[in-house]
């Protein structure tokens, strides 16, 4: 599994997303960047930053009420 944390891109934001691979996660990450951070277009250099922010992750996620990652992990289990 792969994990994206918006905070790893320099935002003070608790958005997290778990997915099988980067291409599966890309649409949701871009939608988040547009809606939560007002990025109408994502510059190529920032897309690279997003790519490197996505890391390998196990499903053992620390409890964080309200996080999308926590909700998804609960569904998968």
Image: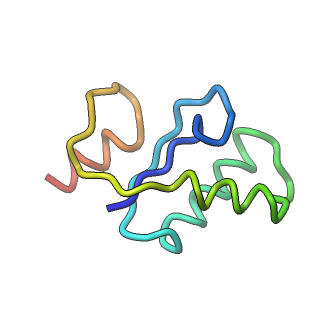
Q: Please, is residue 3 above or below residue 8 in the view? A: below
**How many badges with numbers are in the image?**
0
Q: Residue at x 31, y 42 (%)?
A: 71
Residue, far front: 52
In this rendering, would 50 be left or right of 35? left
In this rendering, would 24 be left or right of 70? right
User: Can you give x and y, in whole percent of width and height, for residue 15 in the image?
Assistant: 53, 38
Q: How is the image coloured?
A: rainbow
Q: Residue at x 39, y 29 (%)?
A: 66
Q: Please, is residue 62 above or below residue 59 in the view? A: above
In this rendering, would 75 be left or right of 16? left
Q: Residue at x 34, y 26 (%)?
A: 64
**Dividing the picture into quarters, in which one does residue 69 lie?**
top left
Work out whether residue 54 or residue 18 is closer to the camera in this orientation and state it: 54
**Dividing the picture into quarters, in which one does residue 65 lie?**
top left
User: Can you give x and y, in whole percent of width and height, for residue 46 in the image?
Assistant: 77, 55
**Dividing the picture into quarters, in which one does residue 29 lie?**
bottom right
Q: Please, is residue 67 above or below residue 45 in the view? A: above
Quadrant of the rendering where the N terminus is positioned: bottom left
Residue, far bottom: 23
User: Can you give x and y, in whole percent of width and height, for residue 43 in the image?
Assistant: 85, 60
Work out whether residue 8 or residue 32 is closer to the camera in this orientation and state it: 8
Work out whether residue 16 or residue 75 is closer to the camera in this orientation and state it: 16
Q: Residue at x 60, y 66 (%)?
A: 27
Q: Please, is residue 5 above or below residue 24 in the view? A: above
User: Can you give x and y, in whole percent of width and height, for residue 7 in the image?
Assistant: 58, 34
């Amino acid at each position: 599994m792969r994990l994206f944390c918006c905070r790893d891109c320099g935002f003070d934001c608790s958005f997290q997303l778990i997915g099988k691979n980067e291409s599966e996660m890309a649409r949701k990450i871009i939608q988040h960047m547009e809606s939560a951070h007002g990025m109408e277009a994502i510059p190529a250099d920032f897309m690279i930053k997003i790519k490197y922010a996505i890391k390998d992750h196990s499903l053992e996620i620390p409890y964080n009420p309200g996080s999308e990652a926590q909700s998804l992990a609960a569904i998968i289990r």
